[in-house]
Amino acid sequence: MAEALRVGIAGLGTVGASVARVLRDKTAELTRQCGRDIVVTAISARDPKRDRGIDLSAAKWFDDPVKLAEKADIDVFVELIGGDEGPARLSVKAALEAGRHVVTANKALLAKHGVALAEIAEKKGVLLNYEAAVAGGIPVIKTMREAMAGNAVTRVFGILNGTCNYILTRMEAEGISFDACLKDAQRLGYAEADPTFDIEGHDTAHKLSILTSLAFGTRIAANDIYMEGISNITQADIRAAGDLGYRIKLLGVAQRTESGIEQRVHPTMVPTASVIAQVHGVINAVAIETDILGELLLSGPGAGGNATASAVIGDIADIAKSRPGFQHAPVFGWPAKELKPYKKAQMRSHAGGYFIRLTVHDRTGVFAAIAKRMADNDISLESIVQQAAGAETQAQKTVILVTHETTEAAVRRAVEGITKDGHLTDKPQVIRIERAE
């Protein structure tokens, strides 16, 4: 049997402690599967005295994760610290430069420094594995990087944030407000005390940028993503979507267009009968469309200690199974130095159907003015529904418009025109309708 794989873990929060526990509890199974033992020989965390429910006294303690990465007697450095700078970046960089394999769950780090770190890993001939960084326990990175050779990806999209999916699911199922759902999500541990990173789309954007690089062979461009969150979704939107045969999901979408690569994160209406519309609660799902395979949908637990730890363990096991001299797959599917510069598509040229909710003054001429603005921008309407805005006032109405395929630019011009006409009593709502099988 080959020598034991020596693992150093930096970060012993929920995920780190779970990883250490699984490596201990599943020793026999992992040894049979990998052909060698996997042993935690070094650790680093903020508080050495904290009880984590596992005996780690046999591992050498390092106060500084960078020192662990540089000096510890390890083969694999597991980074579970978090953050795109500071100890996380410095320790991963140090481990790679020291010729050690790295496993990380840090999507923020990869979104900002992934390509530079990949260049170091490939130069040193070591692995940089990051399955846990995107969609938790779903093996989407391995699938795209290793199992789809020859396939040209045309579009990748999905539900990449469990917090947002949980909130939208409960809003629809129970008819309660966004604020009430968010408070419950925080109480249950699905949302942070400051939920901005999740609910405004930043978490989804980081994950999407990594998938975009894998899908299209481009350098990561997390700052070039059109982004909207879900904090402005109301019960009026949820009900209207249901009446029209749709369900609202926060999607991350990347696709190749004639003008470049389009990356966008925003609330989206998907047909209720579609597979992705059936993904509820904290579950994640990723759809990959290719020329050979067609569409592949991967779905499963997207967050939490166990799901993330499972992905980390899988990455460690892959390293344990590899042998000296084996040619590793490039970190992002293509050699890092061959990744193409990212060419951003013009977002406002995006074509598709749109849901538009307008709260307007209940007076003569409003409908005619709305219709004229739509016609002036060559927007064809599939349906138009008028309803009372609410019992609190009879002086306004809600108008729901669903367009046939049109462009983002045309919709924005029309809505800006209606706003300038002085007919609106509240901020307009525009939600894209996404093609989904």
Image: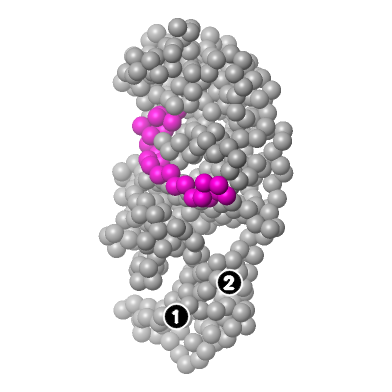
301 in the magenta segment: yes
Quarter holding the N terminus? top left
Looking at the image, is mark 1 or mark 2 earlier in the sequence? 1
Against 116, is 124 above or below? above
Determine the residue positioned at 47% across, 33% down. Answer: 132
Q: Measuring from the top left, give residue 334's x and y in whole percent.
A: 65, 35
Q: Residue at x 48, y 13 (%)?
A: 5
Judging depth in this view, the residue of 6 and 366 nearest the camera is: 6
- The residue under label 2 is which amino acid type? Thr
In this rendering, position of residue 147 left or right of residue 163: right
| Front: mark 1 or 2 | 2
**Mark 1 neighbour density, 10 Å: few (under 14) some (14–19) many (20 or more):** some
The boundaries of the magenta stretch are 289-312
Q: Name above or below for residue 429 compared with residue 387.
A: above
- Tag 1 residue: 384
Pick whichever, 192 or 320, lies toward us. 320
Q: Amino acid at mark 1?
A: Ile
> Which residue corresponds to the image point at 62% horizontal and 79% vertical from the top-left?
377
Can you identify the residue that label 2 sits on?
406
Res. 236 image quadrant: bottom left
